[in-house]
């Protein structure tokens, strides 16, 4: 469920920019880091699993 975090962040940023709603542009400023941490965690898990399978 990592992909929806990035898509939610991007769509909120775009919608906030188009509609000039600062609330919608403030949310992605935090969620971009949440999504980044989630992607790093998934990537580390993938690499660990690949190394264990060798």
Image: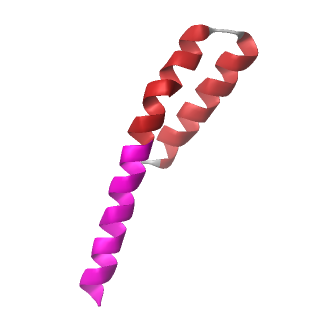
* Image vertical order of residue 4 relative to residue 17, above or below: below
Q: Residue 15, located in which quarter of the rendered image?
A: top right
- Magenta portion: prevailing SS class: helix
Q: Residue 48's x, y, as percent?
A: 28, 73
Q: Residue 28's x, y, as percent?
A: 52, 26
What colouring method underlies this structural image? secondary structure
Horizontal placement of 24 versus 5: left or right?
A: right
Horizontal placement of 49 versus 23: left or right?
A: left
* Image vertical order of residue 13 relative to residue 10, above or below: above
Identify the residue shown where x is 44% and y is 41%. Answer: 35
Q: Residue 7's x, y, as percent?
A: 57, 39
Which one is in front, 1 or 43?
Answer: 43
Q: Residue 16, located in which quarter of the rendered image?
A: top right
The residue at the far bottom in this view is 54
- The number of discs equals 0
Let me know if residue 13 is in the magenta part. Answer: no
* Image vertical order of residue 36 relative to residue 47, above or below: above
* Image vertical order of residue 44 relative to residue 40, above or below: below
Identify the residue shown where x is 36% and y is 45%. Answer: 37
> Magenta residues?
36-54
Q: In the rendered view of the protein, which quadrant contains the C terminus?
A: bottom left
The residue at the far right in this view is 18
Let me know if residue 51 is in the magenta part. Answer: yes
Identify the residue shown where x is 43% and y is 27%. Answer: 30
Q: Residue 32's x, y, as percent?
A: 48, 35
């Amino acid at each position: 469920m990592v992909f929806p975090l990035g898509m939610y962040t991007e769509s909120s940023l775009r919608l906030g920019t188009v509609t000039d709603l600062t609330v919608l542009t403030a949310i992605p400023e935090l969620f971009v880091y949440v999504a980044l941490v989630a992607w790093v965690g998934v990537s580390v898990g993938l690499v660990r699993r690949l190394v264990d399978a060798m």
